[in-house]
């Protein structure tokens, strides 16, 4: 199983990621987010994946996925505007 890493950063009220669209492989890859402060990944349907602190980073992980699909998810954090990047599960 491979990991697709996404770095989450914060500036003022803005959340940003180093990859606006990440492409994990079907039935194989996970997406792993890391950032310097607390945040939550919100998947379609409202499933929340809160980041947990490990060392000096906050980490969250999702996947693998068993269907080809495009997933629009949100990243939320206290006192920040929500960001809505994409996951595109590819063959």
Image: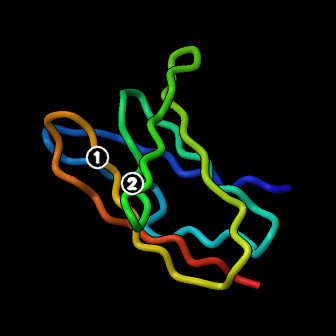
Numbered label tally: 2
Task: Classify 35 as above or below 3.
Answer: above
The answer to whether the residue labelled 1 contacts the one labelled 2, judged by CB atoms less than 8 Å apart, is yes
Q: Quadrant of the N terminus?
A: bottom right
Task: Classify 4 as above or below 22.
Answer: above
x 16%, y 50%: residue = 81
For disc 2, the marked residue is 42
x 67%, y 58%: residue = 63
Q: In this view, does 34 lie to the left or right of 43?
A: right
For disc 1, the marked residue is 76
x 69%, y 81%: residue = 67
x 44%, y 37%: residue = 50
Q: In which quarter of the image is residue 25?
A: bottom right
Q: Viewer-proximal residue, 9 or 88?
A: 88
Q: Viewer-proximal residue, 40 or 48?
A: 48
Q: Viewer-proximal residue, 33 or 72?
A: 72
């Amino acid at each position: 199983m491979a990991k697709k890493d996404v770095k989450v950063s914060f500036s003022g009220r803005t959340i940003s990621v180093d990859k606006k669209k990440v492409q994990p492989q079907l039935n194989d890859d996970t997406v792993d987010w890391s950032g310097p402060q607390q945040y939550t990944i919100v998947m379609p349907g409202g499933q929340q994946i809160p980041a947990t602190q490990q060392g000096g980073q906050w980490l969250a992980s999702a996947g693998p996925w068993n269907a080809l699909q495009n997933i629009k998810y949100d990243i939320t954090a206290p006192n920040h505007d929500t960001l809505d990047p994409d996951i595109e599960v590819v063959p």
